[in-house]
Image (cartoon, rainbow, N blue to C red):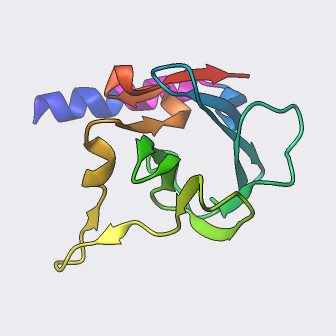
Amino acid sequence: MTRKIVMFFLIIFMISCQDNKWRNVEVISPDNLDTLSIKTIGNKRYIFNGTYDNIPKEHALLDISDVTELGDEIGVCWNKDGYKWKFISFYSEFEYNKLDSTKFYIQNRIKIDNRGIPNNKEYFKEGCVVIYLRGNIIRPQNGAKLIYK
């Protein structure tokens, strides 16, 4: 119990120390061959492949207006099921996907088990990573590199 309380306050502290760097992040695969970019403008989150100064035509759009700071997590799997990367934003609303769906997979809803509990286990498996963008927390740490711009 004490460990959970300490973790909670550590996360709150990390959030308070962050500025808006989390709004423009590059997620780089462990082998440095793939980059998934995330740009957040207001309550809209743009997801695209590669590195660009501007949002390219080929992107996915999510609405994060109902996502709490503590619930703002994403999952990424690299080179899985025939895709260069698979992506999910656990609690956001999916708006559209203009990415090449043969190369990039955007999961628009978190899977719910038969008890109604969100199931994000897939993103804790080998070749995957769960990232808390606002706190620069990566699980496992060797699952990706983050560059905040």
Give the residues drawn in magenta, as a range. 10-18
Residue positioned 43% across, 32% down in the render: 12
Asked if residue 43 is positioned above or below residue 13 in the image, the reply reads below
Residue positioned 29% across, 52% down in the render: 122
Q: From this viewpoint, is residue 66 visible?
A: yes
Q: Which of the pair 13/98 is nearer the observer?
A: 98
Residue positioned 55% across, 62% down in the render: 92
Quadrant location, the N terminus? top left
Q: Which of the pair 12/119 is nearer the observer?
A: 119
Q: Position of residue 102 (x, y in %)?
A: 59, 59
In this picture, residue 77 sits left or right of residue 116: right
Residue positioned 63% across, 59% down in the render: 64
| Magenta part, dominant SS | helix
Q: Number of callouts in the render?
A: 0
> In the rendered image, which quarter is residue 129 located in?
top left
In this picture, residue 42 sits left or right of residue 142: right
In this picture, residue 38 sits left or right of residue 87: right
Q: Is 48 covered by the magenta stretch?
A: no
